[in-house]
Image (cartoon, grey):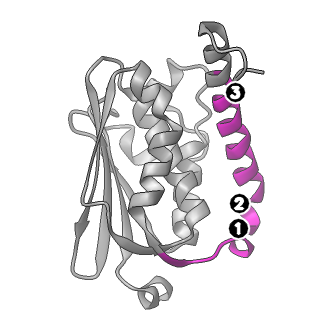
Amino acid sequence: IISNNKNEATASIDEELDKLDDLVEQALYYARSAALEKDYLIRETNLAPLINKVIRKHAKSFIYKNIRADLHDIDTIVYTDIKWMEFILNQIIANSLKSIRHDHGTIHIYTCQQKNSVQLYIQDNGIGIRSNELPRIFDKGFTGSNGRTNEKATGMGLYLCKTLCEKLHLDIQAESHDGTTIIITFPINKQLLFQ
C-alpha cells in the first residue's frame, strides 16, 4: 500500500514499520539467545557487502538526518556467521544514527589488520557515552542517560551484540571520545575461532 501511495505520511509510516521490524527481530534474537549455538554457520565472509547491505537498509535515516557514511578498507575477509553479523552491524549503526543529533554527522566504518586478527571500527561523531556508563553498555537492559531521553530504548541491542559476539568467539568493545567507537575483533583464521 505504501509503495503505491507515496507521500510524506506513508514515508513516515514506512519508517515506523522499519523500526517495528527491527524491534521484532531483536525480540526474536533474545528469545533464541539461550540456544543460539544451534543456529549459526561460521564461514569465510567479505565484510564489504555485509556493511553495504546494512547501510542501504538505513539509507532513509542517513538522508533524512544528513549523515554521511565514510567507508574505507572494508573489503576484508573474516570468519563469521553472515546473518548474525548483519544483526550486530544493524544494531550498532542504528545506535550511531540515533546518537547523531545534528546535520553533517559522519559514521566512519573501517578495518585495521593486526597480527592475529582483523578489527572492525564503527565510529560516529554523536553525543557519545558518559565514561562512568561505558563499562555497562553491554549489560542486559542498560539504557544509560542517553537511553532515558529516548523512551523507546530497550537496552537490549548492545546486550545481544555482546551475546552473539561471544558465541562467535569475537571480541566487542566500546570507546567514547567525541562520539562513540565500537570495535569488533575477528580472529584472522578459522582455527583461532575455537582456541
Task: Specify few, some or many for label 3: CA neighbours under 10 Å numbering under 14, 14-19, or 20 or more.
Answer: few
Q: How far, Cα to Cα, is label 1 from label 2?
A: 5 Å
Q: Main secondary structure of the magenta part?
A: helix
Instruction: Compute the Cα span from label 3 to label 2.
Output: 24 Å
- Closer to us: mark 3 or mark 2? 3
Q: Position of residue 47 (x, y in %)?
A: 41, 63
Local crowd at mark 2 within 10 Å, few (<14), some, or many (≥20)? some
Name the residue type under label 2. Ser
Residue designated by label 3: 17
Labelled disc at residue 33: 2
Question: Which residue lies at the image location 49% right of the left edge and 74% below the top edge?
Answer: 169
Let me know if residue 167 appears in the view.
yes
Q: Secondary structure at mark 3?
A: helix
> How far apart in space, not on screen, are marks 1 and 3 (Cα)?
26 Å
Instruction: Answer above or below: position of 11 versus 112.
Output: above
Reply yes or no: does residue 35 show up in magenta.
Answer: yes
Which span is picked out in magenta? 16-44
Q: Position of residue 79 (x, y in %)?
A: 46, 76
Which residue in the protein does label 1 denote?
36
Instruction: Assign a secondary structure to mark 2.
Output: helix
**Tag 3: amino acid:** Leu
**On the rendered structure, is 33 left or right of 188?**
right
